[in-house]
Image: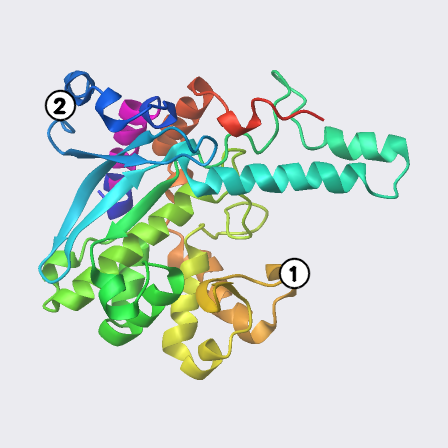
Amino acid sequence: MSIYESYANLLLALHENFHELVLQEYDNFHDFNQKLWENGLNEKLKGKILYLPHTPEKNRGKIIIRPSYKVYESNKYGKFSIEYRSYSGKVAKNIYDKVKKSIHDIQTSKSNEQEKLEKLKELKMCKGNGEFWDARKSIFDFYLDAGTRYRTLYRGDATHYNLFNDLKNYSNYINCLRVWRGDNIFNSLKSEDEKDALITLSWLMFEQDINYGRPSFQQSTHFKKGNNSSHRSRDMIMGFVNMLFSDEELYNNYPFWKKEYGTKISPHFGKGGYKNLDAKYKKYFDEYNNEKKYGDTVSIMNNDGYSAKFKELVSRANQSPYFNDLTI
């Protein structure tokens, strides 16, 4: 079993046991009956969940409860945990805001009324109840809490930028490639710092495979299998890792970064998208589109068994609450 299959098993269990919980609102933490909720849990999860109160984006007068599950214990930096968020996270709010902006931009454009109507229709599905295409994106959203490691070493969270620095400081390309392939190499590592960094890498790669891809509940990405592409979603991260270890100067001068308060957070491909990215950068990503070399390495969503499980859970769930009152 690859590490990504084991991660998928955990995420599926967290979703099945806690999807309803993270969407419930409480006046205060004491209103949440933890004992009653624990009684209904999967046996593998009982006694292993930390319940975290959080103020929701939609209703500042209430609290929601998110489950946190320990996935690793760092000898230096403490507990690494997965916090299951689903629609209660910032990703869901950002997706909703993006759709709302699209509606506004279409309605206020200079297009004629018929053209506006056609563009607005494209935001919704034709089948079923006609919900918005993006209404179930982020359904499996989670957050990796990497203990105190990144706050201590890089004064921030386990962002892509901080992770890449961590990998450069403590690991190497070959071990990153093995993690990208799904190999469980962690117990064979002699360096605790390298183990911490590669475990972080594995979870951020898994997050990429879960939340970006071809199905309608995933966000769009260039890196997906099909249409003469052998890519998997986590190739986006692996491409930057490849660039980092192959040509550090080129990586350091890479121009497209999402920033918060002037600090680099995560890379992107600019307004023109990946197809318009300069070839000197592209080659580090296109490397993994080689079927002969990497065809046996697949995204979890290209594993038929797991893909079916995730899609079945999506079909049983409701859309994001943010979209319940959104109309055109």
Q: Is residue 11 above or below residue 3?
A: above
For mark 2, does the 10 Å Cα neighbourhood hold few (<14), some (14 to 19), or many (20 or more) residues?
few
Quarter holding residue 152? bottom left
Dot 1 falls on a residue whose secondary structure is loop
Q: Is residue 123 above or below residue 1?
A: above
Counting from the top left corner in percent of width and height, residue 197 is at 24, 63
Residue plotted at (26% across, 50% down): 145
Can residue 2 be seen here? The reply is no
Counting from the top left corner in percent of width and height, residue 312 is at 41, 22
Residue plotted at (43% across, 57% down): 235
Dot 2 falls on a residue whose secondary structure is loop
**Residue wearing tag 2:** 43
Counting from the top left corner in percent of width and height, residue 108 is at 81, 40
**Residue wearing tag 1:** 271
Q: Which residue ends up furthest to the right in the rendered image?
A: 112
Judge left or right: residue 181 versus residue 189.
right
Q: Is residue 105 magenta?
A: no
Quarter holding residue 291? bottom left
The stretch in magenta equals: 7-19
- Main SS of residues in magenta: helix
- Quadrant of the image containing the N terminus: top left
Quarter holding residue 272? bottom right
